[in-house]
Structures are given as C-alpha cells and as structure tokens.
Image (cartoon, rainbow, N blue to C red):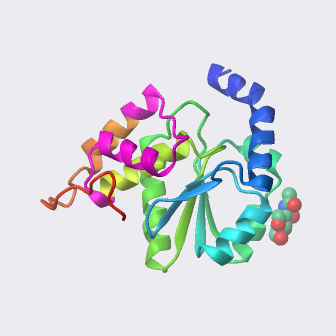
Amino acid sequence: MNFHDVWSKIGFLPSLLYVFLADRTGIENFYTRIDKNVILGALPSNSVLEKITTEENVKGVISVVRDWELKLFNVNFTEWEGRGVAHLQLDTIEFEAPSLYAIEKGLEFIQKVAQSGGVTYIHCKAGRSRSATLTACYLIKNYNMNPDDAVKYITYKRKQIRITKTEKAQIDQCYNIYGSADGSTRAPVQVNDDI
Ligand SMILES: *[C@@H]1O[C@H](CO)[C@@H](O)[C@H](O)[C@H]1NC(C)=O
C-alpha cells in the first residue's frame, strides 16, 4: 500500500466537506479561469458541472484523481459524456505528480477540446496540487513559460495552489520536454499578463 494513498484516504472526508461547503457558499474560489481554454478547480459536483457547462463553455473535464475519489463524489461522467462533455481520467495519487504519460494525454485532450471550440476543466480534489501540475505543463507548452513562472502564474490566479517537491520535479521534466518545443523565440508570458 502506498503511504500517500492511505494518507489521502484519511484526509478525504474532511476535505470533501470543505469542497462541499465551498460549493454551497463560495467561501473560496471553487474554480479559476487560467486562459481561454483552461479552468482549474476542485472536484465538481453535478451542480458545478451544470454551471460550468452553461456559463463557461466547458466541453471537457480532466480528473487528476483516483477512481475511489471520483466514486465518492457521485458524479456520473458517462452520463455527462452523453450531454457533450468529454471526460479523461488521469489516475493519480494525492501528493504525487501525474506521470509524464498522463500529462501528455492531458495536453492532447486540452488541445482537442480547444479545437472544437470548448474549454477544459482540470480538477483534482481541491484544485491545489495534482491538477495544478498538469496546468503548469500546459502553460510551459503553450506560453513558453519556464517552470518557476508557470507556478507563479497559477498561484497569482489561484492563491491556494500548493505544489509538492515531487510535482515541481515533474514540472521541470515538462520543461525539458515541452519548453520551446516549437523552437519559438517569442517572449515568455509574464506572470501578471492576462492570457
Ligand atoms: C451512469 O450513466 C450511464 C448513462 O446514463 C448509465 O448507463 C450508468 O448505469 C450510470 N452509472 C451509474 C453508476 O449510475
């Protein structure tokens, strides 16, 4: 048994309650717009999905969580797919980073949804770590940012971001793979630019 997985299960109910309350009361921004194609947020309930599909043009959801986290939350993504919302699950243990393979799949998914004119909602449990790691890789690939600026940019938009050491190392790997992949010499986007 993986220690992080066990720890994550112990901590799940309190944070589930937190996410539930945030959903009801909006005590902290439940989700954050990153750019025209990406929103980063917490595990969505059916009512949040209703809102983001109608108000934010969300046509794809990436769940950077384990199966049991999704099941506990009682959202039936098969049903949502029937309503035109594509779904991709990237099985990732809390406090750990999505694999490079998962990141590649995620970035392809975002691009496909964007090409169809839609927005992708990336979430883990609270939208603080695992999903932020994928989002940082997205910024590196699409905006020529370096790893530090990508993390700073996301934190500037969403204050509760917490990137673990393992996740930062994975973001650095993303930079090796996707940084200036197109050979572009355009200036990196600045941390407080609106994109
Ligand atoms: C989810 O929705 C699909 C399609 O409506 C349905 O076939 C399936 O039984 C549902 N699954 C659960 C666990 O409710």
Q: From the image, which quarter does the N terminus lie in?
A: top right
At 83% across and 53% down in the image, what residue appears?
74
Residue 172 in sight in this render = yes
Q: On the rendering, which quadrant does ligand 1 occupy? A: bottom right
Residue 101 in sight in this render = no
Residue at the extreme left:
185
Residue 175 located within the stretch drawn in magenta? no
Q: Where on the picture, by quarter, is residue 79?
A: bottom right
Which percent across, then down, holds residue 80? 73, 69
Q: Is residue 181 above or below residue 111?
A: above
Span colored in magenta: 142-169
At 20% across and 54% down in the image, what residue appears?
180
At 69% across and 51% down in the image, what residue appears?
43
Which percent across, then down, holds residue 68? 76, 41
Which percent across, then down, holds residue 119? 53, 70
Magenta part mainly helix, strand or loop?
helix
Q: Is residue 130 left or right of residue 142?
A: right
Q: Where on the picture, by quarter, is residue 44?
A: bottom right
At 31% across and 39% down in the image, what residue appears?
148
The answer to which of 192 and 105 lies nearer the viewer is 192
Q: From the image, which quarter does the C terminus lie in?
A: bottom left
Q: Is residue 89 left or right of residue 154?
A: right
Q: Is residue 118 above or below residue 18?
A: below
Q: Is residue 188 above or below residue 10?
A: below
The answer to which of 153 and 118 lies nearer the viewer is 153
Q: Is residue 149 left or right of residue 33?
A: left
